[in-house]
Image (cartoon, grey):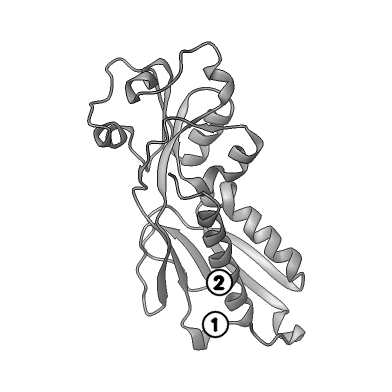
Amino acid sequence: ALHLDPDSLVGTLVIGCTESTGASWGIRHIGEFQLQYPQIDIHVVEVKPQQKDIPGEVDVAICYGRPEAGGRKLEELVSPTVYPVCNPKILHDLPAMTRPDHLAQLTLLHDSQNSWAEWFAAMDMTMPANMSQIHFYSTNLSLTAARLGYGVALCNPFEIQEDLRLGRLVKLLNRAIPESHNYFLLTNQQEHQSLRAQLFVEWIKTQTSETIRHGGSGL
């Protein structure tokens, strides 16, 4: 543990993340961190999925897809899997979903990152023809549509841990494929890192490894 001088915690910490990361799991970790260190003035800024060039004023960036390090410290945070999820209510009048082709009874919700075609290919089948589909520009929207019961989305365990806990979403088939990109942590080199940034890096690593330990590994 780091030696904490309360004065060194006063000041800003700029955290970058994608909108989907923030909305689904980042906010909880940032919020809990702030409760522990209320002196820190946190600014959350957006980085796009697969954004290569991360502005210098970002102290800690949680990146989806590998960014350019540009002299900073880059490490892999987590490489999750994705699997089909939906609101359990839409399954009530349907026969049990036991095979990939059973998903043809539902609407496929696409986002701009993960591919249903790849998921079906990993199941050794082509995507059923004439499937009802909605294409969204972000995981955030496909996830919201799944929560509202409009179909089945491909998500990783980080994005839906709360939903699974509360029963808002359920996993279908437990057939997972690797996420199309890994999550990375981009920070200043150790000697240029504020204590605030060091503490947050330690925090986010601990939280993500907890999620994986508690069954968030996507079976």
Residue 167 at what x, y percent from top left?
63, 33
79 relative to 138, above or below: below
Residue in the picture at 52% in, 61% down: 209
Residue in the picture at 43% in, 19% down: 106
The N terminus - image quarter? bottom right
The crowd level at tag 2 (other Cα within 10 Å; few <14, some 14-19, many 20+) is: some
Left-right relation of 159 to 2: left
| Separation of marks 1 and 2 at Cα, in angstroms | 10 Å
Residue 157 — which label? none
Tags 1 and 2 touching, CB below 8 Å: yes
Left-right relation of 206 to 85: right
Asked where in the image residue 64 lies, by quadrant, the reply is bottom left
Of the two numbered discs 1 and 2 on the same chain, state the one appearing first in sequence: 1
Asked where in the image residue 166 lies, by quadrant, the reply is top right
The crowd level at tag 1 (other Cα within 10 Å; few <14, some 14-19, many 20+) is: some
Residue 193 at what x, y percent from top left?
54, 82
The C terminus - image quarter? top left
76 relative to 24, above or below: below
Residue in the picture at 48% in, 24% down: 151
Residue 197 at what x, y percent from top left?
59, 75
Residue in front for this viewpoint, 149 or 9: 149
129 relative to 24, above or below: above
Residue bearing mark 2: 201
Q: Amino acid at mark 2?
A: Val
30 relative to 194, above or below: above
Residue 193 — which label? 1
Say which element carries label 2: helix
